Image: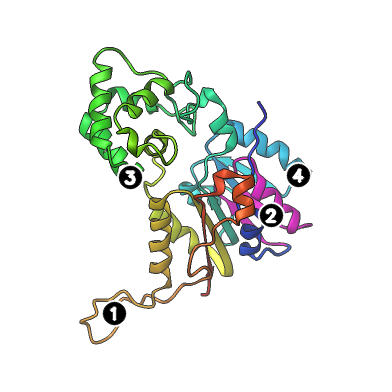
Amino acid sequence: MDFAHIPVMFEECLQGLNLKDGGIYFDGTIGGAGHSYGILKRTSPSGRLIATDLDDDAIAAASKRLDEFDGRFKIYKSDYKQFENVFSAAEIDLIDGAILDFGVSSWQLDNKDRGFSYMKQDAPLDMRMDAKQLLTAEKIINEYPQSEIAKILKVYGEEKFASNIAANIVRAREKGAITTCGELVNIIENSIPKKFQQNGPAARKSFQAIRIAVNGELNGLYDCVVNLTRRLKKGGRIVILTFHSLEDRIVKEAFKFLEKDCICDKNLPVCVCGKKKEIEIITKKPIVASDDEMKKNTRSKCAKLRIAEKII
């Protein structure tokens, strides 16, 4: 199966980056290289790209896709949160722009061997971005305490019936290991009253929550956004696409902190923190996909785009 992925809000992201020839750009979640291809195409002939991804298949596909720009890009197998190490390896200090796209690729969802999708009944419970890491969805479902599973579903999935689902998971695994997506889907569907299953697949929130837990997607995200933004040159921009309310909230709070001119206790007569306003938030409200894009690409429906520009 070819690694295919339709980049969400492609034009909005590239315009948001305010691309220029000769610039150095960072794509922390290269995936199928849709956004990266656009960046290199529009910064010809001398723009450079540094990118990261944890998925070996994505890296291979992206390298092939970007082959025409040989010499102008470098892809590292790394979590984007480790960008400091990547920048050091690439001998880069400051960049002109950065993009983070937190969406799971169409290929990852459609490839049943990866176990990301609740629609692939006989798929293994995997959900790892990095196939070499030890923690899998199967391990969480079969080994984590009931209370921890309920917490994951409630916090990461905002699932109202988290406690009921967790209890039924534990009850089911006592009879034998839960190993496929289909088995988990059945447990989830039997844990949620039918009248609450009218707004899309019942398992969607739980699968999203487990995927986030498997890959540690929210761990260190706030600090990453703050510190990555600080590696922008003056006038450089950071563009972030989120697909989950918790992701969006973290990005929003990080941007708000960077935009503040002072973080001292308001009772102090003068500022002693020395904090200066570091960014201008370009998107006072997040940009969402157009109606036309939502019709063509249903995975864009929950996407939110936030953009900020470094001003110092």
Residue 126 in view here: yes
Residue sitting at x 75%, y 40%: 67
Identify residue for label 2: 39
| Mark seen at residue 158 | 3
Residue indicated by mark 1: 272
| Type of amino acid under label 2 | Ile
Residue 7 seen from this side = no
Q: Few, some or many C-alpha atoms within 10 Å of disc 2 (few <14, some 14-19, many ≥20)?
A: many
Residue that badge 4 annotates: 70
Q: Amino acid at mark 4?
A: Asp
| Residue 149 position by quadrant | top left
Please tell me whether mark 4 or mark 2 is closer to you in this view: 2
Mark 1 lies on a secondary structure that is loop
Whole-Å distance between the Cαs marked 2 and 1? Answer: 41 Å
Real-space CA distance between mark 1 and mark 3, rounded to the nearest whole angstrom? 39 Å
**Viewer-nearest of labels 1 and 3?**
3
Describe the element under mark 4 as helix, strand or loop: loop
In terms of image quadrants, where is residue 190? top left
Give the residue type that dot 1 points to.
Answer: Val
Question: Badge 4 local density, few (<14 within 10 Å), some, or many (20+)?
Answer: few
CB contact under 8 Å: marks 4 and 1? no
Residue 258 is one of the magenta-drawn residues: no
Region rendered in magenta: 22-50
Q: Which mark is residue 168?
A: none
Please identify, in this view, whether the residue under mark 3 or under mark 2 is nearer the observer.
3
